[in-house]
Amino acid sequence: MADPRGRLRRTDTCGALRPKDAGRDVVLCGWVDSVRDHGGLLFVDVRDRYGITQVVFNPETAPGPFATAKTLRAEYVVALSGRVVERGSGNVNRGLPTGAIEIQAGFLEVLNTSEPLPFPPADESAASEEVRLRYRYLDLRRPRLQAILTTRHAILLAVRRYLDDQQFLEIETPILTRSTPEGSREYLVPSRVNPGRFYSLPQSPQIFKQLLMVAGFDRYFQIAKCFRDEDLRADRQPEFTQIDIEMSFLDAEMLFALVEGLMGEIFRTAGFVARAPFARLTYREAMDRFGSDKPDTRFGLELRDLTAGMEHSPFRVFAEAVARGGSVKALAIPGGGAWSRQKVDNLVDAAKGLGSKGLLWIRSNGGAIQSPLLKHLTEEGCRAVLRDLGAGPDDLVLLVADRWKSACSILGALRLQIGRTERLIPDGVHHPLWIDEFPLFERSEEGRLVSCHHPFTSPRSEDLPRLEAEPESVRALAYDLVLDGMEIGGGSIRIHRSDLQSRIFALLGIAPEEAESKFGFLLSGLRMGAPPHGGIALGVDRIAAILSGVSSIRDVIAFPKTASAIDLMTGAPGSVTPRQLKDLFIRLDVPTDGPKPDA
Ligand code: ASP
């Protein structure tokens, strides 16, 4: 138990000892969690990532260690030796796995002291997230975060085992690379040895994994770091980790089966069950029924479509929306008829915030109809709407008339809000599901065609004849994996022929010379024996967050960044010296009051 320098060597962890160990002489190492003075005896809780063990210092049997123990403060680092003894039945601490034993200390060595800490690590509420992130190494001492990072490790280990079993090879791809078109702004890295030229950090290994297929590595994966310079939210970080997968000679069904097996392993690791096959919805159905392309299907409250026949509605807003090709969508909320007027008005305001031109409602309060539509539809008309929707005498109905996608999305967002506030979402239940048949393109705000997934996604073969004539009606061989209302993965069958890839680039407005200069290496690969291939990427951070029951992915990342992309601990991004800039041939042109990202 002592190394040649006379130091104590750890024999057990602070979470290991049980009554069966009584009588053993052990050495524990760890942090002082608390010190309590009880009638002459000192009780010290020592903590490591495995648990907490109570150690007793007795001035009569071990006066030296007792005197040293009196100097201990929270978070000192100690090594101690002593005998494991069973606690009397009245003294068992049932809240601790080690609570039936304690150590009678025989020797104590203070390995390091600690300054008073900015916050006690164990008390979640004692400091703001900002302070915790600044001292992340203290925050990470919390058992909760240690448990989450342990789960994350277990998930990644399960992923590697499963994919290795399925003959996948883990292959790394470059971090210093060229533009990859996932639709976000990129991080650039100047090249000192190539003045004026820049690497991009990869938004994903997309093109490399496709070229690995061309090279014949028919089953590839990587736990890949990806970088996107986007505006951040609770579920986004500038750098994140994905399980990146690509396979040759596959169809979508093979990929679904593979990923369902993989998710089954991931779920099992985190203590849940994922039953395959997962539910599937087309993009159209998901929008129509749940108002989202990443629907939370853990609760009902489905949207309904009232468009049919509305072109003849006496209410002009409905008739005109439908005449313009739009839709009238409805959401019936059981029991909502008795909600306060304020609560309904709040929904109207929330809808405005979501871009709605006007959320309409009809409610039956014990059979009495109230609605801003009464004067347009009459009471009987309002009752007819309720009847159509199967709404009861105490229900509330929300209505939106707009372009199909907007009408669905607005009600979809309200559905989610109501699901949360009315506690309709069951705890501890997880719903994975696939969304497929996405459109290949959508229109950007300036009216250009842009890829919904990325430009390498294959169109469905049956839609190919319409590619140039009606590009927006063409569906993609793309799929998303959704878990509890979060997109946790997305992928597609790829284009493996350069002629089709060139047609897609042309539709996206990428001229042949531009395609050649940006993606020439991919196009030439596609011309040199590219097998049919496809793949997916699954977001590790989001999966770990959902399965750990936390709402922010910051909680599952050891050293995350804030919403303004700052690492509060290191201070990154930091300034650099004029000399460094000179070496890189860079001159700054930053407003004097500091950089303004979008200025
Ligand atoms: N590269 C895609 C992404 O990162 C995933 C894929 O298509 O495999 O979202």
Image (cartoon, rainbow, N blue to C red):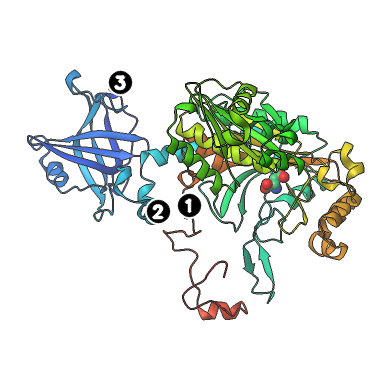
- Identify the mark at residue 133; answer none if there is no mark: 2
- Location of mark 3 (residue): 20
Indicate the quadrant where residue 431 lies.
top right
Indicate the quadrant where residue 284 lies.
top right
1 or 3: mark nearer the eye: 1
Disc 3 under 8 Å from ligand 1? The reply is no
Is residue 251 something one can see in this rendering? Answer: yes
Q: Residues within 10 Å of mark 3 (few under 14, many from 20)?
A: few
Amino acid at circle 3: Lys
Amino acid at circle 2: Leu
Q: What element carries label 2?
A: helix
Q: Earlier in the sequence, mark 1 or mark 3?
A: 3
Residue drawn where x is 80% and y is 44% of the image: 494
Q: Could you tell me residue 319's position as x and y percent?
A: 71, 39
Between residues 319 and 553, which one lies in front from this camera angle? Answer: 319
Residue drawn where x is 52% and y is 80% of the image: 578
Residue drawn where x is 41% and y is 40% of the image: 146
Residue drawn where x is 61% and y is 78% of the image: 586
3 or 2: mark nearer the eye: 2
Question: In what quadrant of the picture does the N terminus appear?
Answer: top left
- Location of mark 1 (residue): 560
Between residues 577 and 87, which one lies in front from this camera angle? Answer: 577
Does 389 sit left or right of 371 as displayed? right
